[in-house]
């Protein structure tokens, strides 16, 4: 009996020892908490010295890379921010200082931050020892102060991937593959690739390449489970959207602010997407539980951007303004082929400069766009709002405010929108009949200071209205004269950066004294025209479902699921835009060539304007 007890005790001791051995690495995972100095970007205030806190743990890399880790995302964003080039040489001194604090070893052969020129890329990588049998490789791509390197952002090309990002990603992947081969046999390898803006796009493609290599056994000891891709303010990178959505790439996470214009490049309407999972940062039209997040992100942004006493509140109106401007670009330029053949070199030359830059059409379109957009104009928003949406300080604050990341998983990817002709007075009410805002054809007056919808007037005087897809609103129009009204209502997919559906009403006739109520259901809007009674009476009848006395009008053209075909309720042609006419007998789109160049130039600046403003300020600072 005594011998049995001894054997049992020895067995228990062995089991305890084995359990300790299994969990020893996790239990003793090193954690590092520290602060890092940085210079604010000066996007929303004067450039000044500041610092951020960071937290690192070896345990970030003990689990599968296919589960988004909010703490790792916060660290990666800080790495990406420190990865901005410093000074006239745009060197990696800030990033290397962070590498030192994280015990990430590097040398001259792993730091590629030469002075930026056209079609170059800056990146640095190094290795940290996590345990005797495990190492971590961290690669950060330069995402700011990249001077002429910025021209690569607009080298779209005609291949499956954005060529300006693709060529840069190829350089990084080639280096990393060789570097990983130097890791001694028997050691586990984890790889973190991260970047912001241009750096995020390069990181997105590079992480996808590493996933592919790892899945084929061509990345040393690294398996896809060991690849961690974290991308911030990430542009669209590839037309291989079906492949990009495969499970293999589910360890790549791209964080995008819906009001940020940069992630909308290249346009989703041209078929571009991203590898992996796109996570939208919360907004009032994408998120139900928004107020607490809004307060936290506003506080964080004031701190990181050093804008005490000054705010850049990003509202729903900023989102529809950015999306409508991108839509104008794609409608105007029509296709990537036209852009590449008629505009790409002009835009690149305007950015690069040189002796011919002053007379370059790309240079003049930048100036004209900024001069009209910087003061807000009829849109009523300033360039500062869009610069703030793209600012790294905004992404730092947003990542801090998301907590464990649950709020990101609950974000809706789509919102509803309504666009109506210029000069049409409207009142929009909610589902209870409460007024939300009035539009007199010039400005919008909201009924409450804080609201979950956006409304503004575009450059041609058209009203833009956006709202949560889960809600229905009611627009009341009163005709003070005989008039025709055209409008469209639909769904915009923020992740895909394109319209998902559109219901279009063209040339609806209203007689003087008639009233109309548009049920703004983004999936199936309905127009009711009342022959008698007031606008308030017609709205009450629509809300109660008793509209037998009104004439019902349905959309005469419907755009569904990305299909560029129209289901028509009648044979009336759509109203042509300034740049596009549609031949319904051939179902083709034809461009108005004399106007295309002008509108293309203006449209392109929708994409580059905000980034130019930011870059100019940085160049002045570093001059």
Image: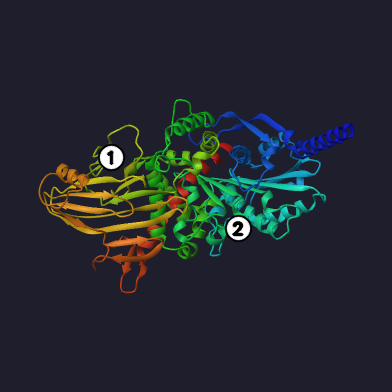
Residue 617 in the image: state x and y as whole percent: 52, 39
The N terminus - image quarter? top right
Toward the right, the furthest residue is 3
Residue wearing tag 2 = 166
Which one is in front, 299 or 130? 130
On screen, 399 above or below 147? above
- Is 8 left or right of 345, judged from the image as shown? right
Task: State which quadrant residue 119 falls in.
Answer: bottom right
Q: CA distance from mark 1 to mark 2?
A: 43 Å
Q: Circle 1: is it few (<14), some (14-19), or many (20+) Cα within 10 Å?
A: some
- Mark closest to the chain's N terminus, 1 or 2: 2
Q: Residue at x 47, y 38 (%)?
A: 388
Which one is in front, 598 or 462? 462
Q: Residue at x 78, y 40 (%)?
A: 131
Q: Which mark is residue 401?
A: none
Residue wearing tag 1 = 444
- Is 417 left or right of 262, judged from the image as shown? left
* SS state under label 2: helix
Task: State which quadrant residue 506 falls in.
Answer: bottom left
Toward the top, the furthest residue is 309
Which one is in front, 506 or 153? 506
Which one is in front, 501 or 39? 501
Residue 306 in the image: state x and y as whole percent: 52, 29
Residue 239 in the image: state x and y as whole percent: 53, 61
Toward the bottom, the furthest residue is 586
- Is 396 left or right of 446, judged from the image as shown? right
* SS state under label 1: strand
On screen, 591 above or below 380? below
Report the colour scheme. rainbow
Toward the left, the furthest residue is 532
Q: How many marks?
A: 2
């Amino acid at each position: 009996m005594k011998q049995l007890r001894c054997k049992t005790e020895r067995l228990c001791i062995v089991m305890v020892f084995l359990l300790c051995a299994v969990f020893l690495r996790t239990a003793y995972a090193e954690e590092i908490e520290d602060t890092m100095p940085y210079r604010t970007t000066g996007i929303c205030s004067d450039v000044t010295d500041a610092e951020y806190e960071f937290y690192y743990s070896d345990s970030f890399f003990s689990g599968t890379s296919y589960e988004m880790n909010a703490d790792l995302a916060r660290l990666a964003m800080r790495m990406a921010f420190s990865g901005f080039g410093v000074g006239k040489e745009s060197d990696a001194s800030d990033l290397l200082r962070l590498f030192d604090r994280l015990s990430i070893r590097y040398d001259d052969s792993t730091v590629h931050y030469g002075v930026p020129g056209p079609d170059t890329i800056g990146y640095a990588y190094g290795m940290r020892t996590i345990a005797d049998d495990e190492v971590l490789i961290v690669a950060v791509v330069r995402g700011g102060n990249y001077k002429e390197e910025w021209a690569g952002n607009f080298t779209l090309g005609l291949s499956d991937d954005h060529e300006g990002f693709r060529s840069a990603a190829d350089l990084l992947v080639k280096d990393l593959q060789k570097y990983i081969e130097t890791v001694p046999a028997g050691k586990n390898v984890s790889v973190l690739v991260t970047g912001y803006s241009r750096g995020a796009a390069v990181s997105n493609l590079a992480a996808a390449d590493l996933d592919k290599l790892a899945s084929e056994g061509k990345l040393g000891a690294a398996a896809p489970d060991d690849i961690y891709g974290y991308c911030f303010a990430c542009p669209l990178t590839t037309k291989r959207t079906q492949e990009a959505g495969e499970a293999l790439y589910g360890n790549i996470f791209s964080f995008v602010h819906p009001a940020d214009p940069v992630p909308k490049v290249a346009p989703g309407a041209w078929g571009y997407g991203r590898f992996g999972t796109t996570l939208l940062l919360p907004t009032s039209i994408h998120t139900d539980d928004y107020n607490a997040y809004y307060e936290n992100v506003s506080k964080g942004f004031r701190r990181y951007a050093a804008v005490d006493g000054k705010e850049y509140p990003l509202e729903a109106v900023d989102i529809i303004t950015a999306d409508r401007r991108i839509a104008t670009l794609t409608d105007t330029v029509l296709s990537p082929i036209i852009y590449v053949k008629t505009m790409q070199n002009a835009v690149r030359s305007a950015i690069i400069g040189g002796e011919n830059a002053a007379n370059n059409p790309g240079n003049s379109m930048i100036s004209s766009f900024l001069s009209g957009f910087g003061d807000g104009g009829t849109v009523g928003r300033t360039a500062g709002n869009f610069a703030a949406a793209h600012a790294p300080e905004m992404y730092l604050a947003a990542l801090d405010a998301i907590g464990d990341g649950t709020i990101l998983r609950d974000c809706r990817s789509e919102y509803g929108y309504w666009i109506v002709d210029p000069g049409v007075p409207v009142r929009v009410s909610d589902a209870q009949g409460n007024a939300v805002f009035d539009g007199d054809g010039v400005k919008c007056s909201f009924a409450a200071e804080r609201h979950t919808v956006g409304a503004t007037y575009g450059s041609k005087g058209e009203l833009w209205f956006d709202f949560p897809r889960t809600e229905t609103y009611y627009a009341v129009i009163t005709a003070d004269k005989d008039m025709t009204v055209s409008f469209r209502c639909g769904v915009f997919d923020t992740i895909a950066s394109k319209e998902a559906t559109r219901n279009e009403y063209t040339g609806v006739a209203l007689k003087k004294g008639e009233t109309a109520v548009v049920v703004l259901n983004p999936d199936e809007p309905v127009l009711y025209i009342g022959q008698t009674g007031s606008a308030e009476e017609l709205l009450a009848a629509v809300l109660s479902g008793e509209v037998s006395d009104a004439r019902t009008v349905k959309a005469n053209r419907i755009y569904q699921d990305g299909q560029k075909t129209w289901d028509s309720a009648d044979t009336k042609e759509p109203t042509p835009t300034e740049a596009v006419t549609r031949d319904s007998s051939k179902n083709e789109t034809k461009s108005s060539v004399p106007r295309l160049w002008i509108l293309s130039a203006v449209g392109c600046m929708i994409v580059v304007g905000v980034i130019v403003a930011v870059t100019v300020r940085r160049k002045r600072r570093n001059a």
